[in-house]
Image (spheres, rainbow, N blue to C red):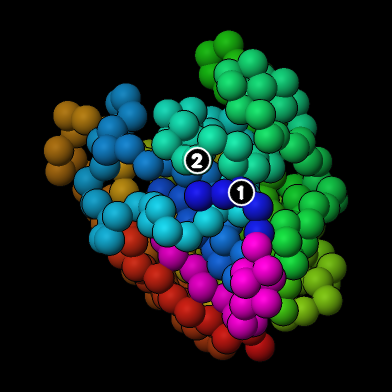
Amino acid sequence: MSPHIDDTTRHAAQGVRVRWLGHATTEIVVDGVRLLTDPLLVDSMAPLVRRRAPEPALITPDDPIHAVLISHAHQDHLHLPSLRLLPAGTRLLVPVGLGRWLARRGFAHVEEMAPGDTRWVGAVQVRATRAAHGGRRLPLGPDAPALGYVVQGSAGVYFAGDTGLFDEMTDIPRALDTPLVAALLPVGGWGPTLRGGHMDPESAAEALRRLDPAHAIPIHWGTYWPRGLGRWRAERFHSPGGAFDAAATIAMPGVRVHVLRPGEARALPAS
């Protein structure tokens, strides 16, 4: 797979397709440009174990990955073994402060971004946004800001990364020249508790008030669970997607929510 975009892709039909691969890993296709977010592609990452496997396989080698969007440096979002499963030379867009750290680990095509920065990936523009979340890689890694990303082509898609609510969310759709077709919002975590710097289903529904997208897809839930916990507080694993759907129906009944299974995709109209 090549990280470059051929003429066939450049002239692909307009439209949006989102596939949730689990946790914060999504495949976003806008106008034929294929992006991967926060790839976590393994069955286990201590102390976490994947409890819901995606179907079909995580990555289809016949399609190019034009760029990877990394929201922040936490290991369940910036997972080096998963990045090494991708083709050598894959383009990585990362928060400012992570470029040299990744280069020392063998990643050659890394571009740093700060909130407000933009990059072109083929025919679509990727803009970094603020995220209200700690970005330091523990225990001794670099400290870099957490980001979200807006992908804009014939339509806009917002990938929130990992974040709590913040006032500037209302500015995200205002900055677009095209409709905000989809918001990909974190609604849970990876264990029995959810601490600061995250959204639960109810606060994610409040985010819809600020963003007003046509569609919403809950992410960052129902995939990984700490090894050894079994079914203890398992409702925190299974319930966030449906709880977000219910809360969104009350908060923003005009937004269509798609609660996907890992590996499931939705094609969304560009307008």
Which one is in front, 145 or 88?
88
The residue carrying pointer 1 sits among few (fewer than 14), some (14 to 19) or many (20 or more) residues within 10 Å by Cα, namely some
Side of 193 where 120 appears, left or right: right
Q: Position of residue 204 (x, y in %)?
A: 54, 62
Side of 233 where 150 appears, left or right: right
Q: Quadrant of residue 224?
A: top left
Looking at the rendered structure, the secondary structure element under dot 2 is: loop
Looking at the rendered structure, the secondary structure element under dot 1 is: loop
Q: Residue furthest front?
A: 7
Q: Which residues are magenta?
A: 6-20
Q: Which residue is mark 2?
A: 87
Q: Is residue 230 visible?
A: yes
Q: Position of residue 226 (x, y in %)?
A: 27, 33
Number of numbered labels in the structure image: 2
| Marks 1 & 2, CB-CB < 8 Å contact | yes
Q: Position of residue 82 (x, y in %)?
A: 43, 35
- Identify which amino acid the numbered label 1 is placed on: Pro
Give above or below for 45 relative to 224.
above
Q: Which residue is mark 1?
A: 3
Q: Quadrant of residue 190?
A: top left
- Identify which amino acid the numbered label 2 is placed on: Pro
